[in-house]
Image (cartoon, helix red, strand yellow):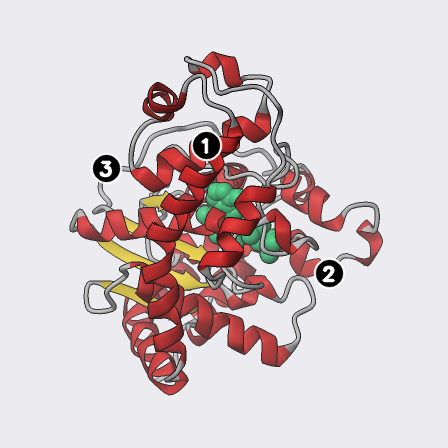
Amino acid sequence: MTEAPQTSGTTPAFAPRVFSGIQPSGGLTLGNYLGALKRFVEKQDEGVETIYCLVDLHAITVWQEPAKLRHATREAAAGFLAAGIDPARSILFNQSQVPAHAELAWIFNCVARMGWLSRMTQFKDKAGKNRENASVGLFAYPNLMAADILAYHATHVPVGEDQKQHLELTRDIAIKFNHDYGIEFFPIVEPVIEGAATRVMSLRDGTKKMSKSDPSDMSRINLTDDADAIAQKIRKARTDPDPLPEALDGLSERPEARNLVNIYAALADISPAAVLQDFAGQGFGAFKPALADLAVEKLRPINSEMARLMDDPAEIDRTLGGGAERAEAIARPIVERCFEITGMIRSRG
Ligand code: AQP
């Protein structure tokens, strides 16, 4: 069987459960904050069961210095906590502490087809011209991501726009597994891609995603940047000489301007159209300082709380360990049942 059968919609038998993750492959950016973290907190505050994961196994699909990976994992955990994730209400942990992820990923390596993975644009972008030298893990990355989600029978996955294709693959894997084994075992997940900043772009190039691994630090705002660095990066952000238009369609050919308007809207919790109502006719000489003030106002409390939490790395590790135990308690029976469905003998005492 090589084709994924076509069905759609969330299987109604599954209770709503949110899962999402972030790679500790560097410091968190404003893109991670607006596209993911801020919305993770909103989901938690809506009262749905929320599970959030620092996906360290994903991070090593490209080379990571071990000490830097450890630091980045703790720093990302501090970012989650500082942004408002409450470890009593959400489960927060790092992926490698719950073996179910890697176990289920192997099953999915045997469900997903080479052709499906070959079409993944993230692999093409990250492997670039040096495809032969890319790790096997980078190619199989979406199968591990499907395992992250489906090990918890999660139904909703808040992500930025860039992860949409991977979530479609997660759906295809669930559909094919259910079809091949003749059982409605995995839910068909719904991507949750919402808000004004589902795709925050680089400050140096409005056609490229803001990314923690971009070689230019000026292309992104890091959650660890202080007020001066934030203001300087916004002041130097690439723009055009025209004033801001009155309506959104006036931004369609102006990616850098659109990006800054979207960032403002997401930080202020208003629509991009409302930003234009306030700034129409004004140039970037006026808009950039207003954006810098807003960014500093919103990010400074997160930045200082992260610094405070990073003073006690052992406490962060304890939080991640506690989260991993709670995550394991949900994932273990699901993965055990999955092994049984696939015909593996489970006879250990
Ligand atoms: N620029 C962005 N705009 C909106 N959302 C974004 N996300 C990432 N960048 C943006 C969202 O953050 C979540 C975690 O992403 P990730 O860290 O797992 O991987 P990524 O998307 O590959 O992020 P980076 O920063 O580009 O990492 P590197 O440089 O290591 O590849 C996801 O929900 C993502 O959509």
Q: Is residue 169 left or right of residue 132?
A: left
Q: Residues within 10 Å of mark 3 (few under 14, many from 20)?
A: few
Residue 77 in which image quadrant: bottom left
Q: Amino acid at mark 2?
A: Ser
Q: Amino acid at mark 3?
A: Pro
Dot 2 falls on a residue whose secondary structure is: loop
Q: Which residue is mark 2?
A: 135
Q: How many marks?
A: 3
- Queried on whether the Cβ of the residue with tag 3 lies below 8 angstroms from ligand 1, the answer reads no
Q: Residues within 10 Å of mark 1 (few under 14, many from 20)?
A: some
Q: What residue appears at the point 46 percent right and 64 percent down from the top-left corner? A: 101
Dot 1 falls on a residue whose secondary structure is: helix
Which mark is first along the chain, 2 or 3?
Answer: 3
| Pointer 1 with pointer 3, Cβ within 8 A | no
Please identify, in this view, whether the residue under mark 1 or under mark 3 is nearer the observer: 1
- Queried on whether the Cβ of the residue with tag 1 lies below 8 angstroms from ligand 1, the answer reads no
Quadrant location, the C terminus: bottom left
Residue 30, horizontal then vertical, whole percent: 47, 50
Q: Which residue is mark 3?
A: 12
Structural distance between the alpha carbons of marks 1 and 3: 46 Å
Question: In the depicted view, which residue is nearer to us: 5 or 294?
Answer: 294
Q: What residue appears at the point 40 percent right and 36 percent down from the top-left corner? A: 264
Structural distance between the alpha carbons of marks 1 and 2: 43 Å
Which mark is first along the chain, 2 or 1?
Answer: 2
Q: Which residue is mark 1?
A: 287
